[in-house]
Amino acid sequence: MRNIELLIGRILLAHIFILAGLGKIGAYAATQGYMDTMGVPGALLPAVITLQVGGGIALAAGLFTRYTAWALAAFCVISAIIFHNNFADQAQMILFMKNLAMSGGLMVIAAASAGSISIDHWRLQSVQGGNHAYHQGT
């Protein structure tokens, strides 16, 4: 059951990043302009999209899970600080807390591992010849 829970948790966390990244592609100029007005160079938008879409897919698939979770968690904290720091606006405060909560969930995934329903597990099994139990540190 643990491995199914880890898979579902990874997918639920990943979907927001994938959808947000794809949304940025669809509203590229507007997103780039918004980033510029918030003091973040709009030239970073391709990196943001790559992290969100690529990281989301990698997280869902359980590929380089620990590193992906750390990167997405850091992104959540940084974007919360930069884009959701107006605590006088309740919606912004909720978005800030949402980002921190997502970061916490991602750190739990990083600590727990991807589980056996993941590319990380299959990679480890192929390297070890399939004869060893899944190791927690993947």
Image (spheres, rainbow, N blue to C red):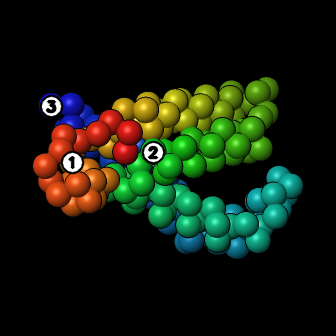
Of callouts 3 and 1, the N-terminal one: 3
Q: Position of residue 3 (x, y in %)?
A: 21, 37
Q: Residue at x 24, y 34 (%)?
A: 5
Q: Amino acid at mark 1?
A: Ile
Q: Which residue is mark 3?
A: 1
Question: Looking at the image, do the residues carrying marks 2 and 3 touch, with CB atoms under 8 Å apart?
Answer: no
Q: Is any atom of residue 9 visible in this view?
A: no
How many residues crowd around disc 2 within 10 Å: few (fewer than 14), some, or many (20 or more)?
many
Q: Amino acid at mark 3?
A: Met
Q: Residue at x 56, y 66 (%)?
A: 50
Q: Residue at x 49, y 34 (%)?
A: 107
Question: Looking at the image, do the residues carrying marks 1 and 2 touch, with CB atoms under 8 Å apart?
Answer: no
Of callouts 2 and 3, the N-terminal one: 3
Of callouts 1 and 2, the N-terminal one: 2
Disc 2 from disc 3: Cα separation: 20 Å
Q: Which residue is mark 2?
A: 66
* Quadrant of the image containing the N terminus: top left
Q: Residue at x 42, y 54 (%)?
A: 64
Q: Position of residue 122 (x, y in %)?
A: 23, 56
Q: Is residue 44 positioned above or below 92 on the image?
A: below
In the rendered structure, find residue 117 and report the number of the disc placed on it. Answer: 1
In the foreground, 18 or 137: 137
Q: Secondary structure at mark 2?
A: helix
Disc 1 from disc 2: Cα separation: 15 Å
Q: Secondary structure at mark 1?
A: loop
* Quadrant of the image containing the C terminus: top left
Quadrant housing residue 81: top right
Question: In the picture provided, is 75 more to the left or to the right than 137?
Answer: right
Disc 3 from disc 1: Cα separation: 11 Å
How many residues crowd around disc 3 within 10 Å: few (fewer than 14), some, or many (20 or more)?
few
Question: In the picture provided, is 56 more to the left or to the right than 88?
Answer: left
